[in-house]
Image: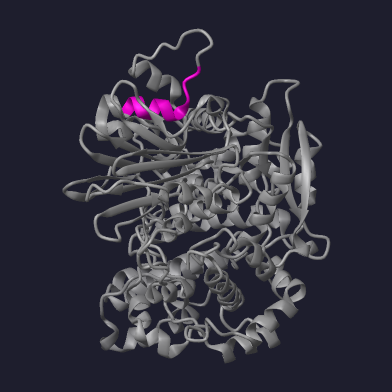
Amino acid sequence: MSGIAGIYYLDGRPVKEEVGRMVDVMKHRGPDEQSTWTGGSAGLGHCMLHTTPESLHASLPQESAQSGCVITADARIDNRDVLMRDLQLSPSTGQVIPDSTLILRAYEEWGQDCVDHLLGAFSFAVWDPRRDSLFCAVDHLGVKQFYYTRTPPQCFAFGSEIKALLLLDKVRCTIDEEKLGEALAWISRAPDSTVFEDVERLPPAHALRVGNDGVRIWQYWEVEPSKEARSLTEQECTRRFKELFEEAVRCRLRSTSPVGAELSGGLDSSFVTCMADNLLPEGGDPIRTFSLIYDEVPSCDEREYIDEIVQNKNIKPHYVYGDKIGPISSAQEMYEFVDDGRIGAGNSFLRWNIYARAEKADVRVVLTGTDGDSTVSHGTERFAELAADEDWEALYELAQEYVRNLDRERGKYAIHGEDDDSVEGVVQKAGFPYLDYWATTGQWQTFLRSAHKISSLCDISLLKVYRQFWKKLLAPEFLVKARVRSAVNQERRKVPPVVDSDFAASIGLPEKLASYRDDIQEAPSVRKNQIEKFRSGLIGAELQHYDTHASAHSVEARHPFMDIRLLQFCMGMPSKMSFQSGWTRAIMRRAMEGIVPEKIRWRVAKTNMSDVFEHGLFDVDGDLAQSLLSDLDLMTEFADKAHMQEVLSTQERRHEFDFTLLASVLSKEVWIEKLHGKEYC
C-alpha cells in the first residue's frame, strides 16, 4: 500500500510545488518516505509504505537511465518470475528488483500493452518524455484506487485519494447531488464516477494515456470464464482449485512484517487463514489474526469457530470487541480519511476497527476473505437453473439435501441470505417466479405442467398454487412480457422512504430505480450471475472501500479470492461444482480437506450480522444518532427527517433498509461537516 500523485500541464507550464502538497495530504498511505519528481510540465509524487521485501529497495518516483521514463506506482506484482524471464532480467548476486522497476521495464518493452503482462494489484503512472505523454493503469479488479481530474483546462492530475486533487486550484469541492441521491437509494455508482463533479475514477481493468491530443481511456481486460475446468473430472477440478487457491495465498504472503489475517469464523476468512498458516515455514512467525467478538450480542459471536482455528493452527490472535463500536461514532473517525461520502455498506465500520487493531500490532499486511462467495459462488442459483429447465425432480432432491444440511445447525444461525429453511420453501422460491413468468407470457402448457409437478412433489394443494396466480390466469391484460424478479429486488427498486420525495423527483430517482438492472434475468444461472456481478463494478467499489480503510492505518489489505487466475477458473466450472449434494461452495470444501478443521469445513450457515448493526446504531450510538438527527442541517435537502426520527424512536423495521439508510444519512451529515472543515474545501 502506497500513495501516488501527479500533474501534467498540457499547455507546457512548469510543475512547481503542487505535487508535494498532494503527497503530503496522503502521507498516511506511505509514512516511510514521501518523494516527488518534476520535469518541466510533468510532475510525479509517491508516498512509500514498505510492505514487501522488494519495496525496501525501491525509490519512487523512479527515472530510467535507459529511456528517461519516470514511474510512480502503488503496486504488488504477483508474476515476478515470469516478467523477469520475459524481460530477460538476470539480477546480479545481491541485487533486488522492486515491483515498480518491473512495471517500468515492461512499459519500456511493450508500451501500453505492458498491462497485458502484469498480474497483481496495481495503480501506476509512467511519464514518457519521448512522447510527451502520461500512461496510467489500474489492476484487473480495481484493488488499487486511481482518481483523476481534467479541470482546469490544460491540466490533468491524478492521485490515490480524492483529497489530493481537491487541493489543486480550480478543482471544485462540489458534490454531485444526483450521485449522492443514487447512493442513498442503493444504486451502484458508475465505476468511472465519484460524488464530486470535478473528479473521476479510472475503473478496474482500464488504462489511459494523456498527450497533446487529449485523454484517451480504454478497457484492456474483461473477466471471462476459463475453459480449463470444462475438460476436467471432478477430482481433477478439485485438485486444480487447490493449486490455484494455494498460489493466490502464497503470492500475497510477501511481507516486511508478520502477516495478519481477518478471521471471522466463516468459511472464506477461515480458509484463507488456514492456507496461509499451511504455507508459512515451520517455526516461522505465526499468522496474526484479527477477530470481532461480541459479548453483548451473543447471536453474532463466533468464538466457537474462531477458537477452532486458533487452537489448531500456529496463530497469534487479536480481538476487537465489536459490541463496543457504533457506525456513527466510527464515521466521525473514518471521514477524517474517507473522501467520497461512501464508507461502505452495513458493517464496514467494524472493518475499520480491525485495521486500527492491526496497526497497533505493527502488522502492515492483512489477508482477507473478501468476496470468496462471489468468486467460488454459493451456487444456490442452481435452484433457479433447474426450475427454468423444468427439472423439478432434480430441484426437489437438491432442496432435500440442502435442508438436511441446514438441519445440522438449525436455530444456531440464520441461513446465508435466505429465509427459506424447508424443502417446500426452497422449491416455491425457485419455482413460483417461473410460474408467474409463464402465466404472464401465455405459456399455459408449461405453467400447468410445472404447477402440477410442484404440487405433487411438495404435497401442496394445486388449488393453493393456482390461487397465487389467479389474476394472471383470468385476465388477458396480464399477458405481457415479464422478467423473473425476486421480492427483495422488487423492493430495492422503490425509492426508500428515508429519501426526501421532492429531492428524489428532482433528480429522476423513481425513473432510475424503475430501469435499474438489479433483477434476475429470464434464464438465470450460477455463472451468468457471477460474471455480471464482477462486470458491474460492484466488486471494484467494495475493494476500494477496503483500500481506503486499510491505508488510513498504514495497512495493506490483500484479497486471495480476488486472484484473477482463481476467479476465471471458478467461473468456468459447471454449476454443480459449486453447489453439490446440498453443499454450497462444494469445490472449496473438498479442496481444503486436511487444511481446515472439519467443524469449519462443513459449516452450513453464517451468522446474520444485522443484530450487530442494530446494537451499534441504537445501543452504542443511540444518543449520538439522536443528537445528529435533531440538529440535522446539511442533509435536510436530501433526506426525510420525519421518517428518520420515526425509525430512530420506534426501532421498527418497516422497510428492509431503514436502519442502514438511517445510518447512511447521519454519517453523510458527518462527512459533509468534515468536508467543510478541510482546507481544500
Residue at the image point whose x is 67% and y is 64% from the top: 330
**Is residue 340 shown above or below 7?**
below
Tally the marks.
Answer: 0
Based on the picture, tell me whether residue 401 belongs to the magenta stretch: no
**Is residue 527 shown above or below 300?**
above
Based on the picture, tell me whether residue 105 belongs to the magenta stretch: yes
Q: Is residue 318 visible?
A: yes
Q: Nearer the viewer, residue 269 or 56?
A: 56
Residue at the image point whose x is 47% and y is 51% from the top: 21
> Residue 396, percent across and down?
51, 58
Residue at the image point whose x is 51% and y is 62% from the top: 339
> Residue 269, percent across and down?
64, 44
Q: Nearer the viewer, residue 251 or 194?
A: 194
Q: Is residue 655 left or right of residue 324?
A: left
Q: Say which quarter of the image contains residue 119.
A: top left
The residue range painted magenta reads 96-106
**Is residue 342 shown above or below 96?**
below
Q: Is residue 569 visible?
A: no
Q: Is residue 323 left or right of residue 460?
A: right
> Residue 47, percent across and down?
52, 41
> Residue 195, percent across and down?
42, 67
Residue at the image point whose x is 82% and y is 65% from the top: 296
Quarter occupied by the N terminus: top right
**Is residue 565 shown above or below 406?**
above
Q: Say which quarter of the image contains residue 81.
A: top left
Q: Nearer the viewer, residue 41 or 637?
A: 41
Q: Say which quarter of the image contains residue 619.
A: bottom right
